[in-house]
């Protein structure tokens, strides 16, 4: 089942998400629904707060990048209770977008490499290093668990320039080709 995505301005996007255990109700279904939602909206990552659940869960599938970045290989992964324990390497800029902030893309600078500890969908503990676009997407999704959005990471000038656009998004004065919940939409 496709789930509606919370738009910029929704308070759940600003909460610190909470850890979960393997007892979490209907988790396999939730993960399946998140994948369905992400693919339908052509995202490469989706964090649970974006579908209204303030829990430390996000999914990634960077496979669509292969088209423009032939050096990439297929990669999909569920991250539960993740902690990025180290970031390293050079800062590099990539033009990011977010399903909660439709039709807006901005250059964001992030470190190239991360070390992350997490549990997979079967709650196996994993400890891995990632670089390149995988590290990029993982850092973006991880930010969602901390209540941070990519638009928080742009320059003060850029923030000023996109302020009005963000306000329009929160009011639903935009079109997205997937179902969204707009926190400040006027009811008719
Ligand atoms: Ni996002």
Image (cartoon, grey):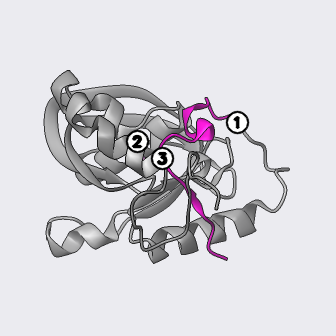
| Residue 15 position within the rendered picture, expressed as x and y whole percent measured from the top left | 61, 31
Q: Magenta stretch: give its range.
A: 1-19
Res. 170 mark? 3
Which one is nearer the viewer's eye here, 185 or 140?
185
Q: Main secondary structure of the magenta part?
A: loop
User: CA–CA distance between discs 1 and 3?
Assistant: 27 Å
Q: Are marks 1 and 3 in contact (CB under 8 Å)?
A: no
x and y, in percent, of residue 86 in the image? 37, 26
Residue 48 vs 55, above or below: the answer is below
Tell me whether circle 2 and circle 1 mark residues in contact (CB < 8 Å).
no
Label 2, residues with CA under 10 Å away: few <14, some 14-19, many ≥20: some
Circle 1 sits on which residue? 19
Is 96 magenta? The answer is no
Quarter residue 85 falls in: top left
- Which residue is tagged 2? 167
- Residue visible at 26% across and 45% down in the picture: 131
Q: Mark 3: give few (<14), some (14-19) or many (20+) Cα within 10 Å.
A: many
């Amino acid at each position: 089942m496709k789930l509606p995505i919370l738009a910029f301005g929704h308070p759940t996007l600003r909460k610190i998400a909470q850890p979960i255990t393997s007892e979490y109700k209907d988790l396999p279904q939730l993960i399946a629904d998140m994948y369905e939602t992400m693919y339908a909206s052509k995202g490469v990552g989706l964090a649970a707060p974006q579908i209204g659940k303030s829990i430390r869960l996000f999914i990634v599938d960077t496979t669509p990048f292969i088209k423009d970045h032939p050096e990439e290989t297929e990669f999909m992964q569920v991250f539960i209770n993740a902690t990025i324990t180290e970031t390293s390497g050079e800062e590099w800029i990539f033009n990011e977008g977010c399903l909660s902030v439709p039709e807006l893309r901005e250059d964001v600078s992030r470190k190239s490499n991360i070390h992350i500890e997490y549990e997979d969908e079967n709650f196996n503990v994993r400890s891995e290093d990632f670089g390149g676009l995988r590290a990029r997407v993982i850092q973006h999704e991880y930010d969602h668990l901390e209540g941070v959005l990519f638009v928080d990471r742009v320059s003060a000038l850029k923030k000023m320039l996109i302020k009005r656009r963000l306000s329009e998004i929160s009011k639903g004065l935009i079109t997205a080709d997937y179902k969204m919940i707009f926190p400040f939409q006027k009811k008719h």
